[in-house]
Image: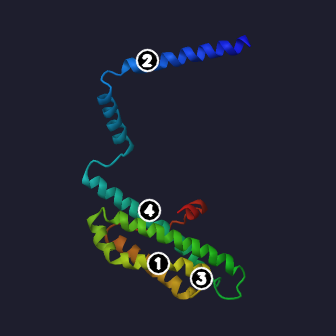
Amino acid sequence: MPVSIRRLIVALTLSCALVAGATACSSSGSSATKDTAAVAAAAATPSPSTTAEKQRLSKTRFVANASLAAGATYQWIVKPWKAGKFKKGAKGRKFALIKAGVAGAFAYNRLKAASRNAKGDPTLSKAIGPLTAGIEALKTLPAKLRKGKSTDSTVGSFDDIINQVKDAGKSAGANVTDKVPSGSQLTHG
């Protein structure tokens, strides 16, 4: 029992010392708290300092997001479609369609992010602007892929939009290449 009382006394002494030290360091109360909060808020949201840095970062983010969308579309939608995995009676058709539906949702998500990133760069925003309606039209296609309905036109829609985004990026100086996402990226989008 004496050991536990000693621990209690040490813990209580340390707690009091910490509280007293923190109270003694605070000079003007609320203004110090406001200054500390302002510094913490500024540190929590880092941002590029110049417009050129913002534009460069938006172009880089655009390329990363569009590349992931292109890679997912090719790997899990176009490639299996070309191999005939979506045809009725094909071995592994259901699993291929489910993977294609998930990849379609991922590609839609990344294309939406890429179009948001493109708004930060004037050249990219002009190139991607006309494609936003096409990207928005992809919203319903992953469900069609999962159900196995009209796979030829659905795959064609995804492939066309991806190629248009690649061309728009290339015209703005942002080359988009296929980058296949990992399984965790695909499921967490």
Ranked by sequence position, the earlier of labels 1 and 4 is 4
> Can you tell which quarter of the image residue 172 is in?
bottom left
Tell me the distance, in whole angstroms, between the alpha carbons under discs 4 and 3.
25 Å
Instruction: Report the amino acid beneath label 2.
Output: Gly
Q: Nearer the viewer, mark 1 or mark 4?
A: 1
Residue denoted by label 3: 81
Tell me the distance, in whole angstroms, between the alpha carbons under discs 1 and 4.
19 Å
Q: What residue is at 34 percent from the left and 73 percent from the top?
A: 128
Q: Nearer the viewer, mark 2 or mark 1?
A: 2
Residue denoted by label 1: 138
Q: Nearer the viewer, mark 4 or mark 2?
A: 2
Position of residue 58 measured from the top left corner of the image (x, y, whole percent): 35, 59
Tell me the distance, in whole angstroms, between the alpha carbons under discs 1 and 3.
17 Å
Residue denoted by label 4: 64
Q: What residue is at 33 percent from the left and 67 percent from the top?
A: 173
Residue 57 appears left or right of 151: left
Residue denoted by label 2: 21
